[in-house]
């Protein structure tokens, strides 16, 4: 049989999107049970909006326990401590309210509440043995897509690079995405998270097309497919349209809505398709430079796209069409897509080379080697990601030369 249409989507039971939708949080929580552990970003916990939500939950008879000790990149000890607090409280539901760090903490607390094992036993794909305490995810940044994805990311001092726990069981029960909640996010967070969302969309749309045995358990990330593609392309269109305005006019709600919608769609798309080389290379780059995740993935994306262009022209051309690039040939559409993406990254202040963010020439071979070692991501590349290809991307991203310059 020839390969035919194939698709996988993983998504919450309910996704509610729109300005003002945060007022639906208490109802969603109460529909699951009367005890809610809330992993809430410490900055957001002090806002009038969050206090109103908490009061409305109390009015519905929901008892709450706040977990506000949250740091970016989630150190493993912090997660175990949060889970211990959660365990004493015995919640029916875990609410995550904040950026990706708060949502990922909610996922990991919900996991440990049900499966009381050391976290490292869940690292990687499909190691979560069964359902977890229901999670309700409320993002206050537009970028990670964590409100809909099957993955949570953390740092473990025993590992050189960040690690992920990926399992369909980590997909939240409900996602409530209210763009109004993102209005207070600092400009750098908006730009970096938004850049990462665009990378999620474009990498989901260009991930490898794999053939899977549909009668067996699938990998969490199955590659580009017929269900994720329309969402990824629509996400890229929203993000390219709204990212520059969202960063230039922070008080303007319309572009924030576009960003939140794009980020959400990108999350659903990459939650099954996965991401690839910008993410694989960003793991060692982030560890080396301490720069924000989205800054690194956004910097790397144009170089990755140039390198895969000869083998992924059709898919880059589809992105060009979605971005309304004016060109008649597939080749010109594909080149136009890359140029548009590079221009958006430049407009929102993403640095253009690895040298700009402090990488030294002597670091390049180590970055290449480590990126190739992130097999979950490197293996999702549409072009086999050997040291030659990854090395060429890393060198061109370092110098700013086009990957196709030779
Ligand atoms: N699970 C996934 O699918 C996934 C995907 C990508 C990234 N991540 C993870 O997400 C994390 C990054 O998340 P992020 O970029 O959303 O940021 P974040 O949660 O780390 O927050 C960054 C900063 O922004 C502040 N902040 C967030 N929202 C705010 C608001 N509305 N108003 C004021 N301040 C606000 C926070 O207090 C914090 O200081 C990383 O740890 C990354 O590894 C997860
Ligand atoms: Fe990302």
Image: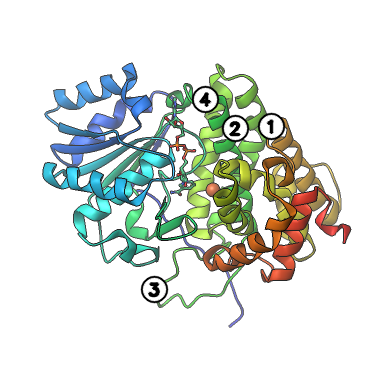
Q: Which mark is residue 186?
A: 4
Instruction: Provide the residue designation for mark 2.
Output: 191
- Category of crowding for the residue at label 1, using alpha-carbon neighbours closer than 10 angstroms: few (below 14), some (14–19), many (at least 20): some
Q: Which mark is residue 349?
A: 1
Q: For marks 4 and 2, give the CA distance.
A: 9 Å
The quadrant where residue 351 appears: top right
Q: Secondary structure at mark 4?
A: loop
Which residue is at a point 73% across and 49% down the rendered structure image?
Answer: 302
Distance CA(mark 1)–CA(mark 4): 14 Å
What residue does disc 3 label? 217
Q: Earlier in the sequence, mark 3 or mark 2?
A: 2
Dot 1 falls on a residue whose secondary structure is loop
Q: Are marks 2 and 1 in contact (CB under 8 Å)?
A: yes
Q: Percent from the top left, x then y, of residue 115?
A: 21, 60
Report x, y in % for residue 157: 40, 55
Q: Report the Cα–Cα distance between label 4 and label 3.
A: 41 Å
**Mark 4: few/some/many CA within 10 Å (<14, 14-19, 20+):** few
Q: In the structure shown, which secondary structural element does the residue marked by tag 2 occupy? A: helix
Query: Residue 196 location, x and y as percent?
Result: 58, 43
The answer to whether 333 is drawn above or below residue 378 in the figure is: above
Q: Is mark 4 within 8 Å of ligand 1?
A: yes
Q: Quadrant of residue 122?
A: bottom left
Q: Is residue 282 left or right of residue 103?
A: right
């Amino acid at each position: 049989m020839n390969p035919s249409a194939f698709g996988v989507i993983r998504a919450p039971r309910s996704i509610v999107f729109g300005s003002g939708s945060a007022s639906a949080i208490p109802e969603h929580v109460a529909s699951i049970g009367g005890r809610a552990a809330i992993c809430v970003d410490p900055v957001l916990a002090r806002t009038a909006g969050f206090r109103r939500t908490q009061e409305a939950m109390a009015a519905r008879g929901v008892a709450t326990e706040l977990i506000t000790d949250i740091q970016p990149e989630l150190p493993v000890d912090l997660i175990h401590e949060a889970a211990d607090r959660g365990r004493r409280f015995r919640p029916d539901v875990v609410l995550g309210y904040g950026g990706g760090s708060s949502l990922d903490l909610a996922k990991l607390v919900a996991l440990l509440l049900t499966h009381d094992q050391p976290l490292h036993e869940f690292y990687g794909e499909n190691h979560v043995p069964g359902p977890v305490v229901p999670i309700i995810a409320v993002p206050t940044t537009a970028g990670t897509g964590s409100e809909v994805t099957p993955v949570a990311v953390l740092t473990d001092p025993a590992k050189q690079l960040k690690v992920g726990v990926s399992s369909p069981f980590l997909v939240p029960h409900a996602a409530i995405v209210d763009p109004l909640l993102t209005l207070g996010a600092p400009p750098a967070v908006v730009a970096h998270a938004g850049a990462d969302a665009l990378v999620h969309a474009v990498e989901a749309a260009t991930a490898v097309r794999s053939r899977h045995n549909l009668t067996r358990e699938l990998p969490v990330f199955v590659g580009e497919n017929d269900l994720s593609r329309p969402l990824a392309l629509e996400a890229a269109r929203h993000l390219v349209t709204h990212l520059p305005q969202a960063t230039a006019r922070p008080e303007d709600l319309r572009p924030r809505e576009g960003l939140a919608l794009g980020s959400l769609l990108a999350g659903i798309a990459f939650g099954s398709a996965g991401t690839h080389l910008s993410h694989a290379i960003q793991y060692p780059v982030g560890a080396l430079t301490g720069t924000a995740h989205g800054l690194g993935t956004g910097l790397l994306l144009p170089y990755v796209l140039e390198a895969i262009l000869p083998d992924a022209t059709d898919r880059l051309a589809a992105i060009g069409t979605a971005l309304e690039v004016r060109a008649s040939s597939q080749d010109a559409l594909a080149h136009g897509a890359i140029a548009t993406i590079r221009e958006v990254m430049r407009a929102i202040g993403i640095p253009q080379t690895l040298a700009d963010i402090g990488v030294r020439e002597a670091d390049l071979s180590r970055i290449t080697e480590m990126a190739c070692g992130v097999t979950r991501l490197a293996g999702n590349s549409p072009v086999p990601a050997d040291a030659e290809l990854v090395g060429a991307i890393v060198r061109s991203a370092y110098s700013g030369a086009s990957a196709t310059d030779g």
